[in-house]
Amino acid sequence: MASSSATAAALVWFRRDLRLHDNPALWAAVRSGRPLICVFIDDPDPEAQLAPGRASRWWLHHSLTALSRSIHQRGGQLVLKRGETAAALTALCEETGATEVYWNRGDSPTRANDDAALAASLATVGVKARGFASGTLFNPATQLNGSGKPYRVFTPYWKACLRAPEPAPALPAPQSLTAFRPVASDALEDWKLRPSKPDWAAGFSKDWQPGEDGARKRLEHFLAGDLADYPDMRDRPDRDGTSGLSPHLAWGEISPRAIWHTVRNHAENGGNFQGAEKFLSELGWRDFAIYLAHHFGSLRENNFNAQFDHFPWRRNPAGLEAWKRGQTGVPIVDAGMRQLWLTGWMHNRVRMITASFLIKHLGVHWREGMAWFEDTLVDADLNVNAASWQWVAGSGADAAPYFRIFNPVTQGERFDPQGAYVHKWVPELSGLAGKAVHAPWTRPARELATAGVTLEETYPQPVIDLKTGRELALESYQDMKANADAAVQPALGG
Ligand code: FAD
């Protein structure tokens, strides 16, 4: 099929690496001197699908628009194809005579396995696959403990990473691309990635600029603030204390190592070391989630700690629905869930509070919450999301112990002391000042009346009494332990 001449075309297959800067696959393809065909494939297979939910698809639309523009400005074309990945790549190679496909490797085991299968299938038609690492700071395969086993706890893992050679410097974006002749492409509009009736993402563009330029601006804006504040302010949802880089990272619009070097340079040139270290360790948590999936398989389906297979989850469809809609009657939870719905993003502290409330107070399986986040987050990342839900549930690696149950009222009082975050997202409570906003059901009738709040009319009563919810959670935990012991006994007895 394909021509074997040194000037035969090469494909550059874009995945969750929608950038030209520090893109090792693209860089190597450019250096090969071949004419290039850049391609993005929308594979409908749920296993292979790059955009797991509706908010991600909104992001993808805009990110592809930005990438296509940048490629075009450098003389190239971004070709869009929908279909099964191996078939689409093979067909494109056949159509264009391309003999090589360059890509950055997938970061989870299923995708990594797919990479190997894909390379094998391309080899059968005489096409060579060239894979590169780009999604993490440190290569997951190389960080092992003294016994040669993968780490299960973050701190020793991260210490090992910090002892390893620093991530390589970021590569520049190619100045120009030698394009192949124009190739037939789907029209992005036809993919209908954006919601229309209704357009629930209408507000997203106010907050986000998908694409590389948006990512760079986010990082610059973040570093223009005081990094010294980051370790404390990152926990305050009422402040602009974090970078907001997560969707850009999730879509690979900026590479972790480009962030690493920019932040370190910033610290060395008068920035704050402690703040920089803390920030980079958060990128380390992202790496760790991918690392866990690499070594132990996806955390989306199974409890990392198998004891939790015996957990007596409750069926609570009404509670789940109230949670999704931000109508639980617990203000910090509702504020978070509404921020998520309206912007596609939620502050990390509030992600922990809302997840804990669903899992522990309402007794709903962590997979239900994970699925809703996958659907509604613009930064939905299958590995990070699953690892984080399991972390909150207590079933994950290095997880918070299950019996440590967040009290959403005290969390709100501590991290949103003036109630500004709740006021912003739950405006019907804006008449309640300061800490009062975090537990309206405890306020005297007169105070509520002055604030214009009528419980069950303007704002719901809590879907569960917090003390009762906590007790139920602790009982369930004891039941799980008893169930797990009972399951082990026959095995031992036998
Ligand atoms: P910053 O504080 O500026 O951190 C910089 C970067 O470090 C982030 O962009 C992110 O890539 C990484 N990071 C920060 N905190 C964490 C963390 N706790 N775990 C892993 N990586 C982290 N993050 C996702 O990117 N995608 C998800 O699908 C996702 N789901 C989550 C679900 C739950 C239940 C919880 C508790 C957390 C989840 N997180 C997820 C992690 C975290 O909440 C977000 O990464 C963070 O809020 C993004 O905001 P930021 O970019 O301003 O963070």
Image (cartoon, rainbow, N blue to C red):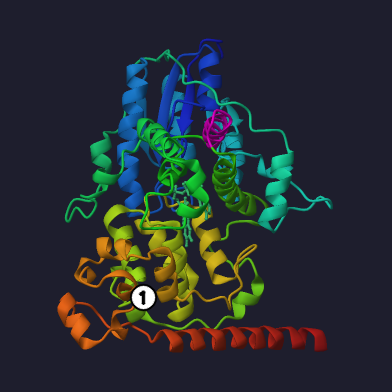
Q: Position of residue 339 (x, y in %)?
A: 31, 59
Query: Would residue 388 appear left or right of 440 to someone viewing this image?
Result: right
Residues in magenta, as a range: 256-271
Vertical arrangement, residue 122 with respect to residue 60, above or below: above
For the image, the number of numbered tags is 1
Neighbor class of circle 1 (other Cα within 10 Å; few <14, some 14-19, many 20+) is many
Q: Residue furthest right?
A: 147
Residue 450: % across, % down: 16, 78
Residue 263 lies in the magenta stretch: yes
Residue at figure coordinates x 33%, y 47% from the top left: 57
Question: Which residue position is annotated with label 1?
Answer: 320
Asked whether, in this view, residue 188 is left or right of residue 128, the answer is left
Q: Is residue 192 above or below residue 390?
A: above
Residue in the picture at 61% in, 36% down: 120
The amino acid type found where label 1 is placed reads Leu
Residue 44 rendering spot, x and y as whole percentages: 39, 48
Q: Is 173 a magenta residue?
A: no
Callout 1: SS: helix
Along the line of sight, the residue nearer the viewer: 75 or 436: 436
Q: Residue at x 59, y 31 (%)?
A: 131
Q: Is residue 297 left or right of residue 426?
A: right
Question: In what quadrant of the picture does the C terminus appear?
Answer: bottom right
Residue pictured at 60% horizontal, 88% vertical: 479
In this rendering, the answer to whether 79 lies above or below 231 is above
Q: Could you tell me residue 204's position as x and y percent? A: 26, 48
